[in-house]
Image (tube, grey):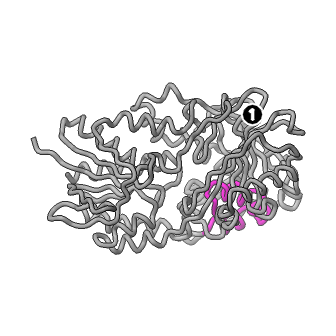
Amino acid sequence: MNRSRVVVVGGGISGLAAAHRLCELARQDRRRVEVTLLEAQDHLGGLIHTQTREGFLLEGGPDAFLSEKPWALELCRRIGLEDELIQTQQGVRRSFILHAGKLQPLPEGFYLMAPARREALWGCPFLSWMGKLRLACEPFIPRRSANGDESVASFVKRRFGREVLERIAQPMVGGIYTADLQKLSLRAALPRFHEMERRHGSVTRALRSGKGKPEVPEADKASGPRYGLFVAPRFGMTRLVEVLARRMLEVELKTNAPVEGIGRAGKGWVVRVKGGQTLQADAVCVALPAQAAGALLKEVAPAAAQELAGIRYESVATVNMAFRKEEFPVPPGGIGFVVPPREGKGVVGCTFSSVKFAQRAPEDSVLLRVFVGGAMAPEAAEQDVDSLQSQVRDFLHRMLGVRAAPRFAVVHRYPRSMPQYEVGHLERVERIEREMASHPGLALAGNACRGVGIPDCVHQAEQAAQRIYDAL
């Protein structure tokens, strides 16, 4: 029986999902496909990093994924992880926005920056009466006649007004993408909002008619992000990595194996690994950040490589801090809060991890996860560990009144980890995909092109695996 060999470059969730899908396809057809996965670091999982300490479960990178986008959830079902998934705790699915030094709740019925119900608008504590009136006028704002892309800031200011942009959209949407909304592409980052305006002429009108919101159970009364849709493995996100790796016994997993280049070898490919090793392959999947992927593709797909090199990334850091409950003047009453740039001084937001999911901390304790850096404060994430901890402690003191020193603090820094989907991003992606399509057996995966979340990464990886399998 003929056999095919595939090399997957990158051992983050995208590379693992691509390798796993290749194995599934080969098993279904009873074909012999040998898969080798090469990871430059000494561990698999990329940004996913879970650790336990003194009864606390700490997440450095992503702590959950959206079930609204089905691909990660479907993967968990196929690998036998579904029974371990838990939702955010009911009764605390509220989010806050820091405004004028105080945490203000986002009223029930807000979908990111838009009110799905009229009472949500008038009960909004961080908008002035003029800001509320401007937001109430959104159904009467004409839809944009131009068909091209625009920035999220332009869209929000045009439809909802400046206050909504500065006080809601920038902290909420900018926090998700660690982005500057003046540069963030509406079509790439918030396609649902683009479609609501295009099809219905008004975002709030579409939301109130039920034509714009995601499918959410009626019982979910969350505000802001749809917290009822967040799920995670009970014992942390690293479980997803562990179970994926365990399910791929036929895959050769190599860590500490950085790839230096990819070239042509007859009808196939050659992958050059640092140290002089070369691997011959019938197909290659590159599951790396954009600039690293571009560096490997310069020889075989120069136009795509140049486009990939143009995708900027920003750095972020997370700081997990553990406290005793009595050290909090006011116990956390929600999932977390986001911070407008002018109030945070580098702090983007904070998750009350011990509230968001059960069994993340001992009963007498509070676990926080603070996000620092991003496009609006890139220098903040580049501080040394002591400076990051000091900045976060000062912030918690000023904003939450927490005077006590934490039981411990753990810092994770992720340099150049968040791709910036700037205006025109989807056009760039289409140019990349056109050139890649001219090279059968060569595919891209990762968060650089069509979504930064885990479900998006899984989806793109499985699509890449299918293209490679079809080309073998």
Residue closest to the eye, 182 or 274: 274
Residue closest to the eye, 37 or 162: 37
Q: Secondary structure at mark 1?
A: loop
* Amino acid type, label 1: Val
State left or right for residue 234 relative to residue 102: left
* Residue 135 in view, yes or no: no
Compared with 78, 411 (above or below) is below
Q: Residues within 10 Å of mark 1 (few under 14, many from 20)?
A: some
State left or right for residue 166 relative to residue 315: right
- How many labels were placed on the picture? 1
State the extent of the magenta-drawn residues as a range.
Answer: 151-179
Q: Position of residue 16 (x, y in %)?
A: 39, 45
State left or right for residue 43 relative to residue 354: left
Identify which residue is drawn at 41% across, 55% down: 40
Q: Pointer 1: what residue?
A: 92
Compared with 354, 440 (above or below) is below
Q: Position of residue 247 (x, y in %)?
A: 36, 33
Identify which residue is drawn at 62% across, 51% down: 412
Quarter residue 190 falls in: bottom right
- Whether residue 299 appears in magenta in the rendering, the answer is no
Q: Quadrant of the N terminus?
A: top left
Of helix, strand and loop, which mostly describes the magenta segment? helix
Identify which residue is drawn at 56% across, 72% down: 146
Quarter residue 347 falls in: bottom right
- Whether residue 154 appears in magenta in the rendering, the answer is yes
